Image: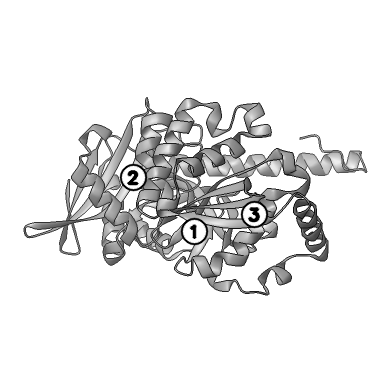
Amino acid sequence: MILVIEGKKFKVDVLNRGELNNSLIQQWTDLEQRSVEGNAYLSPHFILPSIKYLTPNTEVIFVFITYVTGNTSVLTGVGIFEYCRWTKRLPLPHFKAYRTPHSYLSGLLVDEEFMDLTLSAFFAFFSKFKKYSCGVEFINRTEDTRLAKRFQIAASRERVVFHEYYSKQRAILLPQKLNSDYLQGVLSKKIKKTLRYNHNILSKSGEIRWNVLTGQQIVTSCVDRFLNLEHMGWKGEEGTSLLSNSNEEAFFREMISGFAQNGRAFFTELAVNGQVIASTVNLISSKIGYAFKIGWDTGFAQASPGILNEVEFIKNAAELFPHLEYIDSGAEEGSFIEKLWLDRYPLVSGFYATNALTKWVLTGIDYARRVKCRLNLSKNEISKRKHPRGVNIC
């Protein structure tokens, strides 16, 4: 589809996995690095192994937006989606941002130079794509960032309305704010005492060393150490670790290899007497870092090696990664990391309604949800009057 946005021509291609060639994948890789807002979960290094090993039976749709001028063209936007006939939240045909159990963020990759025009082309395209879609769903999309604000402006320009159904806060770490006094300022006396106690316990087992591995340092043995640590404890017992499933393991190895070869991955390791007892895996996209997975040796659980590893990272992050705007924890609300990483940013989930029918349906669903909430509140009030101790009957 060809669209003209403010006198400039944009081509929108809807592709499947088989139509992606090496040239397109390289353009996609280049776009990720100059995107106004990085997103490791939209990187070809993440998406392609995910489709190959995690969701081989899912029909994934790639939307590539290209600015065309004369005989030259520049890829300025990429979105990856799945087609849904209906869901409980939207009982109409729509697209939703592609995600896996390991995808902690959705959105678009957008060239900073062409940000406004690319977003306008994106919403214009989906507004005209009515035969197949009544809307677009994003789960855990950034809010209050520069890109998010431009999202809203572009959507409004195309008369596309966003219906939010969920929001939350996520812990992030800002390397530029870290200094020698950071931990002293954020940690309570109780936590400081616990950390000293845990460090002393660990030191009795031998020399404690902390290290960060990047680029060519990320070799097979490093990956193996992490996988074995992540498999220990409840994840291995419940079958949710990467090693518990051969496809999950294959995905991780191929994914981390792609990021590492491009110098966009790093591991942190805490060791005692040369034995690594805690490890984290982290990804980099554009100017943003992403904490991905953690693992620790349950044999040293009394000393909380995973937390001690995070503390060492905080002490060294400003020096090691001054170029990163922030590091996304990928953690859910209530995670232990919130006690160490005090900054937050909001994420939202919802639908962009691209036609009148979708707007009407989503408005009705929102109204029904509010009525249900009020009824539940009323039931609670009645219950509290009948039961002074406030028994919750919902």
Q: So how many labels did they put on this image?
A: 3
**Nearest the eye: 85 or 241:** 241
**In the rendered image, which residue does mark 2 sit on?**
44
**In the rendered image, which residue does mark 1 sit on?**
143
- Label 2 packing within 10 angstroms: few (<14), some (14-19), many (20+): some
* Mark 3 touches mark 1? (CB < 8 Å): no
Q: Which mark is residue 248?
A: none
Q: CA distance from mark 2 to mark 1?
A: 23 Å
Residue at x 62% of width, y 45% of height? 370
**Residue 213 position within the rendered picture, expressed as x and y whole percent measured from the top left:** 49, 54
Q: CA distance from mark 2 to mark 3?
A: 29 Å
**Residue 155 position within the rendered picture, expressed as x and y whole percent measured from the top left:** 36, 56
Snapshot quadrant of residue 150:
bottom left
In this orientation, does residue 354 appear?
A: no
**In the rendered image, which residue does mark 3 sit on?**
309
Residue at x 63% of width, y 30% of height? 236
